[in-house]
């Protein structure tokens, strides 16, 4: 059976980029593939690579869990847990730290972007974050990982670490890890700047649709979303690969972003969406987008708010999932230690 691992950081303000790029795909995998065993993790250990307020972190772990459930992740079909409850992740991360090479980590572009000019003062955790990500995956011998474009390099590192472990110890223990790049909107951009990724850390709340936004807020944000002065482009802007041509993306990033969000939420190909909307004013697209966001996203927020009033229920979901994850990761870790030569 294929094993799927993926996670979401509990750092607040989860938005439609997180939903379309990750959570919606988690649900689709769970419901449409009987040959997989999915592990969906609230990766709280990754969250503390930068300082977190303890009370806020506790709240956001539960909020992220509630978003998983409200979006359709079923604990009867998927294993839902928070990372810090399963000690095997950190123990395996140390072992993999001893397999990974400094040169490999030095090539990680995301660390360079996050650290900027201040890299001497950031945490070691931020630097070695990709090794913990590898441990998350390999703790369950997962072979499939839903991943966004910005995480592909980290996944390649996990593959390199797994291969080196197998080579060094002359075993075939870890499987080959394959990326799953799913969905029609793998990279959702800001509503205010089509050249910047939608981010929970953006100062402007109008740059994103949060999963807890109410209908009035959603409507207001979409009405104010940046477009351009032209009509919606037609199907001729789509390349042979089914995606918007790079030249159109370069010239009209905000327009392309809204169209891609609409197509993803309405489960249409870009060709279908542009066949309906091409040549019309952006007012029509915004009206349709408001309707579908209120229909699909607002109920998630409402359900999350209800669940947060029953924290005991959420704690039980996490504990039950952690028990399953802990058993499997512990068994795998015993085998890994035996291979290494520990007694």
Image (tube, rainbow, N blue to C red):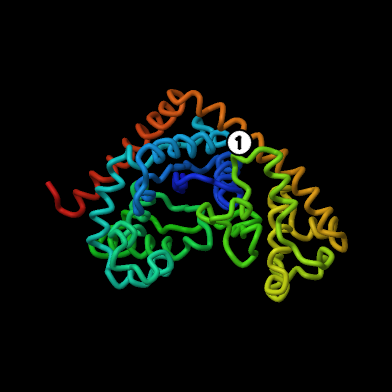
Drawn side of residue 199 relative to residue 160, left or right: right
**Placement of 124 over or under 223, stated as above or below:** below
- Residue at point 77%, 70% (across, down): 237
Tell me residue 10's x, y (percent): 44, 44
Q: Residue furthest front?
A: 203
- Residue at point 20%, 49% (across, down): 337
Tell me residue 201's x, y (percent): 50, 54
The one of 148 and 314 positioned closer to us in this rendering: 314
The one of 184 and 332 positioned closer to us in this rendering: 184
Tell me residue 77's x, y (percent): 51, 34
**Placement of 251 over or under 131, stated as above or below:** below
Residue that numbered label 1 is attached to: 301
Q: Where on the picture, by quarter, is residue 331?
A: top left
Q: Can residue 3 be seen here? A: no
**Placement of 297 over or under 96, stated as above or below:** above
Q: Where on the picture, by quarter, is residue 70?
A: top right
Drawn side of residue 224 relative to residue 104, left or right: right
- Residue at point 74%, 44% (across, down): 292
């Amino acid at each position: 059976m294929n094993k799927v691992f993926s996670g979401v950081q509990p750092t607040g303000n989860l938005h439609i980029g997180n939903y379309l790029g990750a959570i919606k795909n988690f649900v689709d995998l769970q419901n449409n593939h009987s040959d997989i065993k999915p592990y969906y993790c609230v990766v709280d250990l990754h969250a503390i690579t930068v300082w977190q307020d303890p009370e806020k972190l506790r709240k956001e772990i539960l909020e992220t869990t509630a978003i998983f459930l409200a979006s359709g992740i079923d604990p009867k079909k998927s294993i839902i847990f928070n990372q810090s409850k399963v000690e095997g992740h950190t123990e395996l991360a140390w072992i993999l730290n001893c397999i990974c090479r400094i040169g490999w980590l030095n090539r990680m572009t995301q660390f360079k972007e996050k650290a900027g000019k201040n890299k001497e003062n950031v945490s070691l955790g931020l630097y070695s974050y990709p090794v913990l990500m590898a441990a998350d995956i390999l703790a369950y011998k997962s072979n499939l990982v839903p991943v966004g474009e910005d995480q592909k390099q980290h996944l390649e590192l996990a593959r390199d670490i797994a291969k080196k472990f197998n080579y060094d110890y002359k075993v075939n223990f870890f499987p080959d890890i394959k990326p799953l790049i799913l969905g029609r909107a793998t990279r959702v951009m800001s509503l205010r700047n089509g050249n910047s990724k939608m981010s929970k850390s953006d100062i402007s709340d109008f740059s994103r649709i949060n999963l807890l936004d109410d209908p009035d807020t959603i409507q207001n944000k979409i009405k104010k979303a940046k477009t351009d002065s032209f009509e919606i482009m037609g199907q001729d802007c789509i390349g042979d690969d089914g995606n918007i041509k790079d030249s159109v993306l370069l010239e009209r990033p905000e327009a392309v972003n809204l169209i891609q969000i609409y197509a993803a939420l309405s489960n249409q190909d870009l060709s279908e969406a542009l066949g309906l909307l091409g040549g019309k004013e952006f007012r029509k697209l915004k009206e349709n987008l408001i309707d579908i966001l209120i229909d699909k996203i607002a109920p998630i927020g409402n359900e999350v708010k209800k669940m947060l009033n029953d924290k005991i229920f959420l704690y039980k979901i996490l504990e039950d999932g952690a028990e399953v994850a802990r058993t499997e990761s512990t068994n795998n870790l015993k085998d890994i230690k035996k291979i290494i030569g520990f007694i």
